[in-house]
Amino acid sequence: MTPGTVDDDLWSAIGDPTRRRMLDLLLVDGGGTATTLSQRLPVTRQAVAKHLGVLDRVGLVRATPAGREKRYRVDDAQLARAADQLASVGTAWDARLRRIKGIAEAIQRAQPNPDA
């Protein structure tokens, strides 16, 4: 993927509020299993496992065996890449909004002033 390109799969994964909450919990706790996460979320262990699978597929979490379960940790490099993409998108939107503002101000200046 080229720099400045947005990874739609990554943002689709992050777009889900439950997955964002899971990432928050994993970051705060330093990791967790589907069982430990399900105890802190309003979803079943099976739903947590499916969400973790999505996060794993896009590389936001990495799993290591922990007994009969897998222990998940946030992949710092992939999370940093997501943050960089968000910053890039924000910068692009800021530029678009500045252009729109300039156009709107030019239109307003070109309008005859009824109070004059």
Image: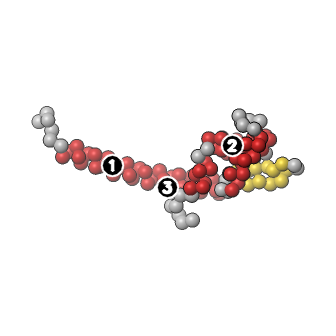
Q: Is 111 left or right of 43, judged from the image as shown?
A: left
Question: 56 or 25: which is nearer to us?
Answer: 56
Residue 33's x, y, as percent? 79, 45
Name the quadrant of the C terminus: top left
Eyeballing the image, is 43 above or below 88? above
Residue that protrudes farthest toward the bottom in the picture: 2
Q: Amino acid at mark 3?
A: Ser
> Residue at (60%, 54%) from the top-left corner?
10
On the image, numbered disc 3 is attached to which residue? 88
Q: Residue at x 72, y 51 (%)?
A: 53
Query: x, y percentage for residue 78?
Result: 64, 56
Instruction: Say whether marks 3 and 2 touch (CB < 8 Å).
Output: no
- SS for callout 2: helix
Secondary structure of the residue carrying tag 3 is helix
Between discs 3 and 2, the one toward the N terminus:
2
Which residue is identified by label 1? 100
- Mark 3–mark 2 Cα distance, whole angstroms, equals 24 Å
Question: Residue 49 placed where, x, y %?
Answer: 75, 46
Amino acid identity at mark 2: Met
Please identify the quarter of the rendering in which residue 112 is found.
Answer: top left
| Residue in the picture at 49% in, 55% down | 88
The residue to which callout 2 is attached is: 22
Q: Describe residue 67's horizontal placement relative to residue 105 as left or right.
A: right
* Mark 2 closeness class: few <14, some 14–19, many ≥20 residues within 10 Å: many
Q: Residues within 10 Å of mark 3 (few under 14, many from 20)?
A: some
The Cα–Cα distance between marks 1 and 3, rounded to whole angstroms, is 19 Å
Alpha-carbon distance for marks 1 and 2? 37 Å
- The amino acid type of the residue labelled 1 equals Ile
Query: Contact, CB < 8 Å: mark 1 with mark 2?
Result: no
Q: Nearer the viewer, mark 3 or mark 2?
A: 2
Residue 76 locus on image (x, y percent):
66, 54
Q: Residue at x 79, y 49 (%)?
A: 71
